[in-house]
Image (cartoon, coloured by chain):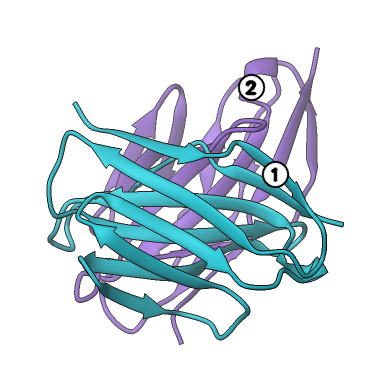
Chain colours: A purple, B cyan
Amino acid sequence: GDSVTQMEGPVTLSEEAFLTINCTYTATGYPSLFWYVQYPGEGLQLLLKATKADDKGSNKGFEATYRKETTSFHLEKGSVQVSDSAVYFCALKLSSQGNLIFGKGTKLSVKP
Amino acid sequence: SQTIHQWPATLVQPVGSPLSLECTVEGTSNPNLYWYRQAAGRGLQLLFYSVGIGQISSEVPQNLSASRPQDRQFILSSKKLLLSDSGFYLCAWRHQGSSYEQYFGPGTRLTVT
């Protein structure tokens, strides 16, 4: 079935370090791909998205490129801040249905 | 603009007690509504979704039920809570039509003791 696999956390980085959170997917159709962020004690917020192959989503310094050949959507940021500490969820949505399928989430902790 | 509310924000309930969590959406009509549970180490699991009043789809068999008595109100219930029902419950909505994004509420932290 359709699924999303994320690298397991937690990920601990120092401020200004480079971040990569890996995400791969399995889908029978042509999904849209998303990254959501959950700050401590809050609900999820959409961080960025890509709707077709080779699209790059970006927001708040974060980027992710939809790679159909490797079925991946890795999240990157060149220089993380303490305020980026959160749980990050990769998700896919099949156009035929509209429901989201989430990965298990990756907790990021950024130390000053 | 649209907003989504959930209450209560936190809840501590004994095993065997009933549960009612409420979610309401403002500023839109006929939304799709969703209940998710986030349990420790298990990621985000879709529990129920609804495309209209009285229309509920269940994604996983469990001790919980959902109802949609009004267009913008979505309720999650249980008659008898289990320890395994503990978690963070998130409500979400989106416009009708699969191309739209989902927007999440602030969540309810449920601890079953």
Residue type indicated by callout 2: Val
Residue type indicated by callout 1: Leu
**Left or right: where does residue A93 sit relative to residue A61?**
left
The residue sitting at 49% across, 67% down in the picture is B46
Q: Quadrant of residue B43?
A: bottom right
Instruction: Kindly tell me whether residue A7 is visible in this rendering.
Output: no
Q: Position of residue A109 (x, y in %)?
A: 76, 31
Residue denoted by label 1: B11
Q: Quadrant of residue B2?
A: top left
Chain letter behind tag 1? B
| Rendered-image quadrant of the N terminus of chain B | top left
The residue sitting at 70% across, 55% down in the picture is B87
Viewer-closest of B92 and A91: B92
Residue denoted by label 2: A80
Tell me the element at label 2: loop
Q: Can you say whether B63 is above or below B88 in the image?
A: below
Q: Position of residue A65 (x, y in %)?
A: 38, 48
Dot label at residue A35: none
Chain letter behind tag 2? A
